[in-house]
Amino acid sequence: MELPDTLKNNLRIIKTSLSDELFDKLLSDCNNMLMNVIIDNPKDKMKLSWSSDTKPELCKAIYSDYISIIKEAARNNYDPENLSDYLQTTGIFNDTQIQKLCQVYYKQIKTPMVLHLSSIGDSHPCIVDISWRLDYCLKTSNNNYMNNCIYHIKLTTKKGGTISDVDFTCTIEGLHELVYKIKDIVRHMEKLVQRNCGDKALK
């Protein structure tokens, strides 16, 4: 888990002006907001509150930074001990605040947040198997003569432990186009890998 330096610096700066009472209120508001997002409840999804003597921009920054912490912790599947150890090294909260944050994170937020992130993750299904069948079509039900090869393709994919099939039918021309696009993607990926390796070598 790694947080941006700007986020950590912001929280270190405002830590002295963040009372325990205000922290508890912000913690409660952020958790309510996150749960509304997770269950897709638009009502009060972005309802924020703060005391009249607290600058709104300060509270908004804390909301944003706190949510980033929770998101990263859930994305890395941190337990309370891992999260507490990490926050101790950053110096962005005091011991009492870290304890409260970790308790609320584990008891209320972690499980639904992990499930929510897995459902909207940027990872695509992996192709684990492929099968195909070739048919020769002489005539359609509309009495149209085709005399074409028809390929029936089934891709077996896996994402998050779930297996699913993608079935489609194409002509020889469509199959050639699909193969060409796959080869083009492979070339682009190889270039990205080579560029990334080159950048790391320069560091």
Image (tube, rainbow, N blue to C red):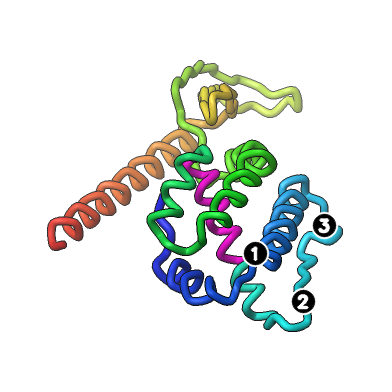
Q: Amino acid at mark 2?
A: Ser
The residue at the point 78 percent across, 82 percent down is 52
Q: Is residue 151 visible?
A: no
- Residue at the spot of label 2: 51
- 66 in magenta: yes
* Number of numbered labels in the structure image: 3
Q: Which disc number belongs to residue 130?
A: none
Q: Position of residue 106 (x, y in %)?
A: 61, 40
Looking at the image, is mark 2 or mark 1 earlier in the sequence? 1
Residue 172: in magenta span: no
Give residue 178's position: percent from left, percent from top. Answer: 45, 39
Residue 39 found in image quarter: top right
| Quarter holding residue 82 | top left
Find residue 138 and report its image quarter.
Answer: top right
Q: Amino acid at mark 3?
A: Pro
| Relative to 28, residue 55 above or below | below
Instruction: Give the spatial CA distance, label 2 vs label 1.
Output: 13 Å
- For residue 32, above or below residue 105: below
Residue 100 or 157: which is nearer the viewer?
100
Residue 165 in view: yes
User: Which residue is identified by label 1?
Assistant: 20
**Mark 2 and mark 3: Cα distance apart in space:** 24 Å
Q: Earlier in the sequence, mark 1 or mark 3?
A: 1
Q: Is residue 149 left or right of residue 27?
A: left
Residue 80 to residue 37: above or below: above
Q: Say which element carries label 2.
A: loop
Q: Which residues are magenta?
A: 63-78
The residue that label 3 is drawn on is 42
